Image: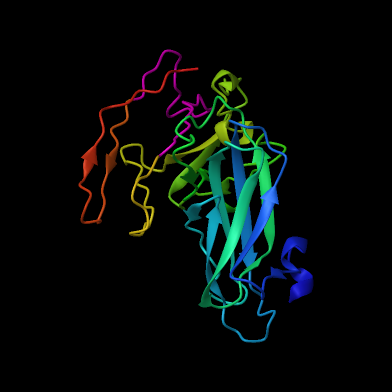
Amino acid sequence: MFQTLPRQYQNVRFFPDGSRNCYTLSPVVKRSRYLVRTSFMYGNYDGLNMPPQFDAYVGVNLWNIQLPTNAYHDTLNEILVFTTMDYISVCLVNTGNGTPFISTLELRHLNNLTYQIVNEYQSLELFNRKHFQPTSSGIIRYPDDAYDRIWSPWGNNPWIPINTSSSINLREDIGYQPPLPVMNTAVKPSNPSENFSFYFPTSNVIQDCNIMCSCTLLNWNDSRATIPENSTSIWMVTMHTALSHLSTHLWIPYSPPYQ
């Protein structure tokens, strides 16, 4: 079993001593934005077959990480932080529910023009990052993504994958810079009159969310529906939530520019 696992999951670092064990990531550039990524795979390394549950902190702030629920389930967690010191501290805290452990800890320096919502007062935890293609297309990350963000495929069977070889403006001037393989591929409904509906299961842990969407209006080779230049696509986005303290929001129509 373990021989078939990715190399980073074939070993685990665990912390049986002390209630709080920390990594110090340094040096980092002060007043800069960084992506911190952790992964966890329990693998029943201790023979107890009881995946530990513990807390994680970045500096003094609690990080709501997702942990494995069985021996061979792996989890990936990301958080974007703004540095005020020349180091970043990542700590695992024993809460009495098993010995803390970790499989990987990664750090990526971001362009300071991007993710402006991240500052010295708030961080941004990743809930999901998807690119719309069949699941067989695999993940996209570095070197296609300059910041090594991980993009997982998402494509329902009724959706039809499309792509373009035309030049796409990745907006490097604003720093976000989505990777080209994400932006030159897309999906469309099998029925042109249908809407796109996406469902993200959430939890009460999520109090505030920031949704970022990168879109390209593609001109694809399709005799039934070719998009001419200067075309306008108008989206009406609706968000529904079952959380008692939030209401349903209707966003104003949005029209992405033709580029």
In the displayed structure, 224 sits above or below 67; it is above
**183 and 85: which one is in front?**
85
Asked if one can make out residue 12 in the rendered structure from this viewpoint, the answer is yes
| 219 is within the stretch colored magenta | yes
| 137 is within the stretch colored magenta | no
What residue is rendered at 35% in x and 46% in y? 208
The residue furthest top is 230
What residue is rendered at 72% in x and 37% in y? 143
Q: Which span is picked out in magenta?
A: 211-233
What residue is rendered at 50% in x and 24% in y? 219
Residue 140, located in which quarter of the rendered image?
A: top right
**182 and 163: which one is in front?**
182
**25 left or right of 239?**
right
**116 left or right of 108?**
left
Residue 2, located in which quarter of the rendered image?
A: bottom right
**34 left or right of 233?**
right
- x and y, in percent, of residue 225 in the image: 42, 27
What residue is rendered at 55% in x and 24% in y? 113
- State the predominant SS element of the stretch in magenta: loop
